[in-house]
């Protein structure tokens, strides 16, 4: 029988893998997927060091190396996984001594009211008409749009209660819950979306039958062809939020429509 190493005799790489496996059933599939990507690609030489030998200097050298390849947000996520692993194994380092790279303030590319109107026009009659119209008019997340079924639409309202997210193997997996409790909601569709939903051919149980990556690719092609910036699908969520705020919709109501559990994003981004 092979003996299991004592926690502090594990390498960091072994400990990170154990940490991910121990949390696999309580974390979201997308979080597990992100952790596995870090485990496979980002630990580098740091992964070979025994937990008992790991120092703040080792962490800083690792961060300095990864800063040449990854964005500041990615570095922060990598360090978060490593420090959570260390805590699980009761290894405590002085993280105040570790410096993360500074990153630019997040500035999403948000469409204006005029651009939103043009987007609704250019997608009409295309294979991305429904997912883009839903994103623009309701501000849904891509994962929520991907999981919408025709049974969630009653002719006036859409019931948002599920999501499709990549699992640890990067395959889309449907879960019967949304990102948070606040994300489960019922939204009234406007006249434009209602018209497009009602006339659509129901080829599948899902309202949108395309993969999110394929939707984004086609959507950005349409943006390019019509002289619009390279918007993302998530940018339409930003646009929907900004439009609500510009029209004086109270923060509380905007949060409820967007399925957000706190006002932080509305106040600091939009």
Image (cartoon, grey):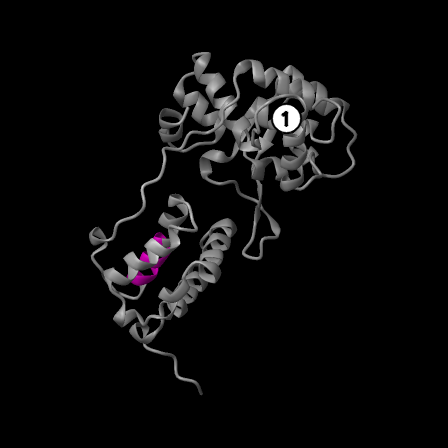
Most common secondary structure along the magenta stretch: helix
**Vertical position of residue 192 compared to residue 205: above or below:** above
User: Horizontal and vertical percent for residue 83?
Assistant: 31, 57
User: Horizontal and vertical percent for residue 87?
Assistant: 29, 60
In the figure, residue 193 lies in which quadrant? top right
Q: Is residue 161 left or right of residue 253?
A: right
Q: Is residue 220 left or right of residue 264?
A: right
Whether residue 152 is visible to the viewer of this picture, yes or no, is yes
Depth order, front residue of 26/59: 59
In the figure, residue 209 lies in which quadrant? top right
**Vertical position of residue 66 compared to residue 113: above or below:** below
User: Horizontal and vertical percent for residue 163?
Assistant: 57, 41
Whether residue 148 is visible to the viewer of this picture, yes or no, is no
User: Horizontal and vertical percent for residue 187?
Assistant: 56, 25
What residue sits 26% from the left and 49% below the top?
99
Q: Is residue 83 magenta?
A: yes
Depth order, front residue of 127/188: 127
Depth order, front residue of 177/33: 33
In the figure, residue 266 lies in which quadrant? top left
Position of the C terminus, as image quadrant, is top left
What residue sits 43% from the left and 61% below the top?
20
Magenta segment range?
79-87
Dot 1: few (<14), some (14–19), or many (≥20) neighbours within 10 Å? some
User: Which residue is the extreme one toward the front?
Assistant: 68
Q: Is residue 58 magenta?
A: no
Would you name the residue on which mark 1 appears? 223
Depth order, front residue of 27/47: 47
**Vertical position of residue 74 compared to residue 201: above or below:** below
């Amino acid at each position: 029988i092979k003996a299991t190493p004592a926690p502090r005799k594990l390498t960091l790489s072994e400990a990170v893998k154990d940490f991910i496996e121990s949390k696999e059933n309580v974390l979201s599939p997308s979080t597990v997927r992100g952790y596995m990507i870090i485990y496979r690609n980002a630990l580098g030489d740091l992964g070979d060091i025994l937990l008992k030998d790991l120092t703040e200097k080792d962490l800083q050298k690792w961060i300095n190396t990864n800063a040449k390849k990854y964005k500041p947000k990615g570095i922060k996520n990598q360090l978060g996984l490593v420090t959570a692993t260390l805590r699980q194994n009761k290894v405590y380092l002085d993280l105040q001594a570790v410096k993360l790279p500074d990153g630019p303030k997040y500035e999403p590319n948000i469409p204006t009211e005029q651009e939103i109107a043009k987007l609704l026009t250019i997608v009409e009659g295309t294979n991305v008409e429904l997912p883009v119209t839903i994103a623009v008019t309701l501000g849904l997340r891509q994962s929520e749009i991907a999981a919408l079924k025709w049974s969630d639409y009653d002719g006036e309202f859409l019931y948002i209660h599920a999501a499709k997210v990549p699992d640890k193997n990067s395959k889309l997996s449907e879960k019967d819950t949304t990102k948070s409790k606040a994300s489960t909601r019922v939204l009234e569709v406007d006249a434009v979306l209602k018209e497009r939903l009602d006339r659509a051919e129901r080829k599948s149980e899902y309202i949108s039958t395309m993969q999110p990556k394929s939707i984004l690719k086609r959507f950005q092609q349409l943006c390019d062809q019509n002289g619009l910036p390279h918007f993302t699908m998530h940018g339409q969520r930003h646009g929907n939020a900004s439009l609500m705020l510009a029209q004086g919709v109270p923060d509380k109501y905007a949060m409820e429509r967007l399925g957000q559990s706190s006002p932080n994003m509305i106040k600091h981004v939009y």
